[in-house]
Image: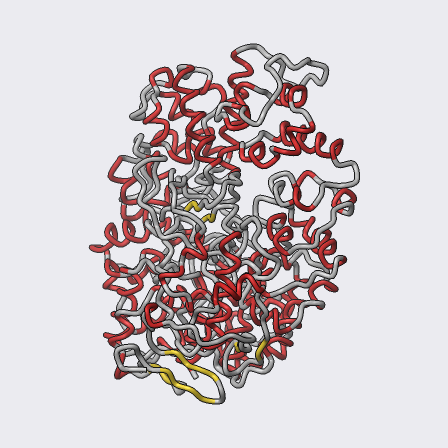
Amino acid sequence: MGDRQGRVLTGHGETHCLWVVPETQLQPKIRGPLPRVTLGGDLPSATLSPSLTTFRLLSSLTWTHCLRPCCLPARTTSEHHTAMGPRAGALVNPGLALLVSLTAHCSHPQAEGASQGGLDTGRADLWAGASASLLQGFWCQPASQLSRDQLAALIRRMATQHVLLRAWQLSCLANLAARQGLQGDFELHPPDLLLFYNLTQVEEADCRAFIRRAAQGDTKLLANLPNQRAALQHRALTCLGGPQPRLSASDLLLLGVLVCDMDASSIATADPHVLQNLQHCPRLTAAQQAALNRLLASGRTVLGPPGSWNLEGLQALGPLASYISPGLWMQLQEAVGLDFFRSIVAACRAGQLRQRDARRFVTNFLEAKSKAVSSPSKRDTGRPCVRGNITAATLHDDLFLVRYDCGQLESCLGSRVLRANLDPLLQHPLPAECQQVVKAKLARVYPGGVPEEQLRLIPSLAYLYSLSEIGQWHITSKDTVMTLLAPDGALENQTEAILQKFLDHNGTITGALLVAIGGSRLCWMSPQQIQAIRPSEFRLAGALDISSCPQTRKNVLFDKAREAFASASTTDTYYRFMRPYLGGAPVEELRHLAQANVSMDIDTFTNLNPRVLQSLSLGNVTTLLGPNVGDLQKARSHPIISSWLRSLNRSALSELGLDTGPTGPTSSAHSTTGTPSTTLWTRHQVPTSEGPGSTAPSSGSPPAHLGYLPLAMALPAGLLWLLYGGTPRLSWGHPQGICSMVEDCTAPAPHAGEQGGLKGQSLPTPSSQDLEPEGGPGPGVTAPASEEDAAPVLRLLLWTDLAN
């Protein structure tokens, strides 16, 4: 290849890609079996066999050409994930096969300017222009070799590219920046990174500017650092001059997303501009919802009193509209309410809103309508059909749920129409009562169990089925499993039963399937199912977040991960792959890692086995954390950290610098900057990993999503259509389960600071989803909502190369 195309290094029969090949130069050269896929020079290979149809799509590619990992831009979403249309799978499967096939020839990527021995600081200029995909695979150890100027350029690049790192990456990067004296350049740094800085080092003159910038970040990243979160709140109040009886518009501008931690009374009395802050909150507590409704009812907002609300004003509320109470909907002009209802359902059916938000709105709105006409609050099973029989055309009416309540749905929906139109019916955000009606009708239509082709259409109903009812299902396709186990589908405790039905029909748990269902589902698989996963498939899945698992499952998953990654040639490489699974590590493993100076981040440390942690000496812990040991101060109230600290004597606490402070070494209170006032703030529970199902983003990670594929770095920009399956559309910004079953639909979510109503939002580039290439097209899988996605394997390998 010429210089203009880049360089390809070969060795040991594998190709190492260093540059981008223009797509116009890809020529057909192979007509035979696909090559073996190698996950990295340190790991054994696994053979993948895409379907014949998929292979035909790929057969025109030149397998001697390789691609630089630069095609996918950074995600810019408020919850660090985007939503894909539910039917994206029809195009995703070939895309994944393409990624896998390309990876077979680009299996050990290295950035130009990097070598096996470490970072080539002579080519550090490349890091200032690195792609977002590469930067998302950031690891601290290679970055620690950079000079001050090079590290500064790297951090600035992350900010300009809006690279969304996870908590375990941000905490160590913040420490690197502090050691290089870069914290003062905070205005050029990513807002998320500011959340992890030592707040005692923020100059008084910079206080307001620092908090304003930090308040654009995602405070969920501090889930495992309760003291840092409290310190940030305290610092914000200090910048305001202390707790305020009523937050002004300028105060709210400063506080940003920190308003999401405010108590209900502060929201109700705040300047009406608080609505703009609340739009960026992932969810509101019941007390905050009540405060929001009091504020809206007062007429002090730009919407005015409820009787004067219009469609544009309601749309400007964005996700907050779903919290409006039935009492306020009753005061609305009927025409305005119906127009808004129509717009919400249309957006939901188009895959632009998550089902939870849309269903909450629909339930409240229909309750108001029911009260207004004095209709029965409960379904009367004996009522005749008075609205007319439901037809296919009826189901395409956005006001269908207004015209047919749940009683009329039962009376007017015939079995034939249900069988033929289940998909458009479930596009509507049915209230729970109506979902029960549909489930009961399906049971009458299919007394032997819902057939598989219909199972793919009912993920929103799956949570209603008992384990015995699931036992009647016949599941033969991975697509069906992925659809049912989508975040808005089956409950977590239904995972084992659904997977078992698949395994009973000779199914296998592949790496792509693990990526699709997410790490949280691993928590609910039986030990036997986990053991049945082949090591090669576990390697392909990469890093899955299992921090919400009960300790027993963490132990089993650690053993499986060690089986998969034990062949890594160095301890450093081994640690990089094993890091997400160390919550199940025995004491001997942690002592070995401490001796290897891996510099564990505080987020990973807080997810270790509490009993094992008690067996570690002070020397073990300080060596294990290395330069990150100071972060214990930021997490001292975390249950696991607090328990360990209580086992130490005063001398040991003094050595850690944790023997002083206004609240004492084991207090559950709070700050590294003094005792904060909690006048404005609500209390937040720290995740303890006691068991699955926690809504807290354990490990400080964004909620689970199928976001960036483990192999996404191999995909050229010209082939992104294989993954997207549609065009981006507007979203309220919380794609936690999509009610649409519409073809080629994607729903990207805006970043915090960019959310608004259904109009005028900026659109990020949608991320792709990882589906198993075998088994043919099928429904896509929406972005998981509870746990971290699988870490992109190729980015991980690249950063591993830099450290080796």
Name which residue lies at 35% across and 20% down: 309
596 or 372: nearer the eye?
Answer: 372
Residue 709: x %, y % from top left: 48, 62
Can the viewer see residue 20?
A: yes
Q: Is residue 451 left or right of residue 793?
A: right
Residue 133: x %, y % from top left: 38, 65
Residue 485: x %, y % from top left: 62, 50
Can the viewer see residue 514?
A: no
- Which image quadrant for residue 715? bottom left
Q: Is residue 334 left or right of residue 652?
A: left
- Which image quadrant for residue 192? bottom left
- Quadrant location of the C terminus in the rendered image: bottom left
Extreme left residue here? 205
Q: Is residue 536 left or right of residue 571?
A: right
Residue 391, compared with residue 143, is above or below; it is: above
711 or 366: nearer the eye?
Answer: 711
Residue 296, compared with residue 553, is above or below; it is: above
Name which residue lies at 69% across and 49% down: 493
311 or 140: nearer the eye?
Answer: 311
Residue 159: x %, y % from top left: 29, 60
283 or 62: nearer the eye?
Answer: 62
- Which image quadrant for residue 734? top left
- Quadrant location of the N terminus in the rendered image: bottom left
Name which residue lies at 34% across and 32% down: 316
